[in-house]
Every structure is written in structure tokens, then in C-alpha cells.
Amino acid sequence: MSQPIVPQKTYLFVFLCLISLTILTTGVAFIDLGPFNTVVALAIAFSKMLLVVLFFMGVRHSSGLVRITLVAGFFWLALLIAFTMSDYRTRSWTPAPDAWSSTAPPTHP
Amino acid sequence: MRTRLGRPLVTDAEAHAHDTGLAHQFEDLEQQQEADALGIWLFLVTEIMFFGGLFAAYAIYRWLYFGAFQGGSHILDIRLGAANTIVLLGSSLTMALSVRSAQTGNRRATVVFLLATMILGGIFLGVKAYEYNQKFVEHVVPSLDWAPEGETLARLAPGGLEHAEIYFFFYFAMTGLHALHMIIGMGLLLWLVLRARKGSFTPHYFAPVEVVGLYWHFVDIVWIFLFPLLYLIGGRY
């Protein structure tokens, strides 16, 4: 909002970058990088998102208030995924105590 | 604005300001535009969390049943997915150009770019409908038509059929929610076309075009992540 008028060339250039990255990410899927296939795919998706957010959505000209709102949204999304994943990935680290098992006899007299 | 008896409720200056699209509750256009921007961004943040729940659940199940997700991913047509990504990125370009045209007061270009955005959005949804139909042909629709056979079965079996079904639940839930957002976006675009044709937008007032544009770009970003997460799991080498 209340942004300067961006030249059409800029939008076209960003679009060409987005197309190139799409072709790149599709091409990389046919090369065996092991676990890095996922890393590369997500890194490219993140770059594409940044291009759209900064240029098409004009955040590079946005006010600080809008930027911090956006960053807060992604911060909360990161919390959601990080805490949920850390729960699931660590559940098996400590087995449930025997006393919790229905088959175990009560230990107290 | 003073309301003392004998004074007009709206002064000439304020009446003139209304012509430029300034609503009464704002000091000036800049403050109004800031409020418009903050409003749509707050909405988009709730949308991030809305889709975020699905992305978090996806992350867990993909980690638990990676083999099944890889098998399910390889059933999808990577060419259609990539082509549709490019179509949607193209619609984001025309949307950005439409906002720019509204900004410069070019009514005709605004309408043309809005219509181009709608056409590209329509192509995306058409390809998506074809892909959904393919899932019924291959019997990989969870619950409704889940009976993979032949080559499809051979691809899905190693990861566990019931786990592959979970993958397709995610596929339909995530692309379905995305498609629903696209359909709503198409309706909003049609509304903009009608308003732009009437000349409702001026270089001072084009907030609706800008706000719908931000929504449309957001939906594009969701797809930017859905494409690698659903179509490009584990590689096709």
C-alpha cells in the first residue's frame, strides 16, 4: 500500500526467476541426492515464496507494522511444527514405566 | 467534523476527500492504506495457521511413513504438477500487473489483467479436476474408491497400503483446501472485474484490487509448497 509504482520489467524478471526455480526443482527430483532432495526442494520453495512476498506482494515497500505481522505468523507456524515434531520424535526415547502397563501387577501392597 | 447546530455535518473539503476514496474514519489516505494492509495481512496470518495445521500433520506422517508417502507421490503426474505451478505463477504475475494498472489508473489494462488471472486460475482448476479424475480411474481415492491394482498397487504396496491411503488423505485435504481458496479467489476476481469496468478504482483508491491481489498471491505461495511436498517426495531417479 502507498507503494511506489514498480516497473513492469521487474515483475516480468521475478516471474522468469520463479519459472526457472520451478524447472530447477522439478529437474533436481530426477537426481539422487539422498536426504538432500528434500532439503533442496524446500530451499527452492522458500526462495520462491520470498520472491512472491517481497516483489508481487510488495513487502519490500511495506511498513514495519505489516512486516512484523508477517514474521509473527511464520514464527508461530515454526513453533507449531517444531514443538509437534519434537513431541512425536522423542516419544520413544523413554519407555513408559512398568507401573503404567495394564499387565504389570500393582507394586504397592 | 463539528456537529454544532448550524454547521454542515460534512464540510466541502471532506465531501471532496470522499471522491478520492478516503473513508470518514481515517485522517488521510496513507493511514487508510496502512489499515487496509494490516487488515488483510492479519487475515493471511490466520490463513498461515489454518494451512499450517495440515502442514504440521503432513510433516509427522511423512516422517512416520516415508516409504508410503514416496510411493504415493510417484503415482502423481509430475509434469502436470510442474505445468500447473507455472500456470499459477503466471496468474500471480497478471495479478501483480493488474494491481499496477489500477495504481496507474489504466482501467482497461486492469480489467484485461484481472480476466487473464481468472483464465489462468480456471486452467489450474481444470488441470486439478483432471488429476482428481485420474485418482478415481486409478482407484486411489481414500475411503471413497480405495482399491489400487496392477502397477499402482506395485508402487504403493512396499510402503504399506494403509499408510499410502494416509498419503492420499493428505493429498486430497491439502489440494482440496487449496482449490477451495482458488474458487473463492475466482469469485473475488469476478467482483473486481465488474467494479473495475464501472471505473470504481482510481490511483487514489484501489484497495480492493490490492487486497484481493495479496490473497491471490498467498494462495499461490501455498501451492509453491504443496508442489514439492506432494509431487517431489524422494525423487524420481
Image (cartoon, rainbow, N blue to C red):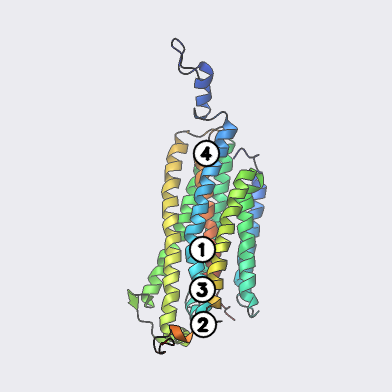
Q: CA distance from mark 4 to mark 3?
A: 39 Å
Marks 4 and 1 belong to one chain:
yes
Residue occupying the point 45% across, 46% down:
B189
| Mark positioned earlier in the residue sequence (3 or 2) | 3
Quadrant (top left/top right/bottom left/bottom right) for the N terminus of chain A:
top right
Q: Nearer the viewer, residue B28 or B179?
A: B28
The chain containing the residue under callout 3 comes to: B
Q: Nearer the viewer, residue A37 or B87?
A: A37
Residue B19, horizontal then vertical, whole percent: 50, 25
Q: Nearer the viewer, residue A17 or A56?
A: A56
Residue located beneath label 1 in the image:
B84
Quadrant (top left/top right/bottom left/bottom right) for the C terminus of chain A:
bottom left
Single out the mark in the foreground, 1 or 3.
3
Q: CA distance from mark 2 to mark 4?
A: 47 Å
The image's mark for residue B207 is 4
| Mark positioned earlier in the residue sequence (2 or 4) | 2
Residue located beneath label 2 in the image:
B67
Q: CA distance from mark 4 to mark 1?
A: 28 Å
